[in-house]
Image: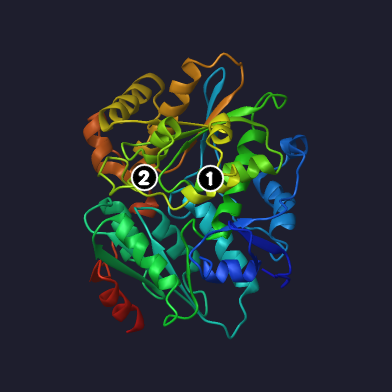
Amino acid sequence: MAFTKSYERRISLIFNKAASLKEALFQGFAPDGTLFLPQDLPQFNVEYFRDLSFLEICSEIGKKLFPEIEEFTFNPPIPFLTFSDNTYGCELFHGPTLSFKDFGAQIFADLLRAIKGDDEELTILVATSGDTGSAIGHAFTDTPGVRVFILYPKGRITSSQKKQLTTIGKNITAIEIDGSFEECQDLVKKACLDPDLPNVTTGNSINVARLLAHTFTYFYAYSRLPDPSKPAYFSVPCGNFGHLVAGMLAKKMGLPVARFIGATNINAVVPEYLQTGVFEPRSARPTIAVSMDVGNPSNFPRLLELYHHDLAQLRADLVGFSFQDNEIARAIKEVYKTKGYLLDPHSAIGYLGLKRFMENEKNNFPGIFFATAHPGKFRESLETIIQESIPLPQALQIIKSEQVLFSPSDYKEFMRILIK
């Protein structure tokens, strides 16, 4: 693939400072620890997208967002399913690691390869609650001058997710952290801001490239609706809230969104904030939706900044719901029994959020929920729920031996491992 190498376009920090696109990607965080948000977003006419393929939509949006990429090649199947007359599901889990995170990871990797000089070296750190790490790891495998460290919390991801993280090898290293996802995330932030560790960035949705890449999925999903004349509701399973922020950026670029539904498991700090106006981050509690076990979403500051820290404005665009494990399991069984369709726990939360919202909504607007992970990644819990065996797809039939480093959540010890 050929690339251009122009990075003159500007990106702003959430506190109105400025950095180039390359600086935003290579730093992840700004030097003062704040996050990047795009400035002067382009506008698109969604009617034009109606007859376009996913790759064509990527090309139309990408030449404005990422002119550095001459050609987009990531083109997985994206089934668009009808659940009722006005309710739809959009499957985003048909990439190489069977998670929606592949969209952001693959496009982020293409963009970084386009703007990275041949003699430049970069370390990418990823804190993962299950899916992000393997998506970034696979996207950057064998990339010259790039090494990736994946930090995952001990005992808090599924066996399939762990296999995906720990068997990549080559320039990808998995580190099991004796702590929570929040502690993994804290280690990544400290390392990115550490002056003794040059050329370190993050592959989490903290990195603005990941957010912008996910806007493509919203434009595509909307373009598949049978009636393009109405705005749509989007229900998004949320952990770190990166995919939801991407949707809000898409709305600012012209996507007709009537309302976003931010659906979480019991780690419901954002739905609670929408109700009370008080944000109280806390350690995540384990659930069957392990990839959403996040008690301090890193994208929360972006939510506030996009709506000028005005809670009333945010509530006008976003409603939040949270669900217990028993509610998630009940929805999985119900949909499987009535429709023959197997939801993974995270997709089930998106489905539940849309269902609860639509029950009391009087406007006749269509609703779309995102299915974000293949059920095979959560085989153990799903087999218990539906009392049937679930065949594993080829991508999860991993027989290679695992390669793992181990670290406490202590930063000095973690830094020693990185330097070594």
Mark 2 lies on residue? 292
Colour logic: rainbow
**Residue 403 vertical placement versus 348 (above, below):** below
In this picture, is 163 found above or below 327?
below
What's the amino acid at mark 1?
Leu
Q: Is residue 6 left or right of residue 358?
A: right
The answer to whether any part of residue 285 appears in the image is yes
* Residue found at x 61% / y 21%: 365
Numbered label attached to residue 304: 1
> Which residue occupies 38% across, 52% down?
394
Of residues 188 and 115, which is closer to you in this image?
188
The spot of residue 26 in percent (x, y) is 55, 71
Q: How many marks?
A: 2
Numbered disc 1: secondary structure: helix
- Please name the amino acid that badge 2 sits on: Met
Cα separation between marks 1 and 2 = 20 Å
> Which quadrant holds the C terminus?
bottom left
Side of 318 where 254 appears, left or right: right
Comes first in the chain, label 1 or label 2:
2
Residue 214 spot, x, y in % from top left: 57, 49
In this image, 257 relative to 288: left or right? right
Residue 398 drawn at (x, y percent): 31, 58
Percent coordinates x, y for residue 310 in the rendering = 56, 39
Callout 2: helix, strand or loop?
helix
Q: Which mark is residue 90?
A: none
Give neighbour class at mark 1: few <14, some 14-19, many 20+ (Cα, 10 Å). Answer: some
Q: Quadrant of residue 120?
A: bottom right
The quarter holding residue 386 reads top left
Residue 392 seen in the figure? no
Q: Quadrant location of the N terminus?
A: bottom right
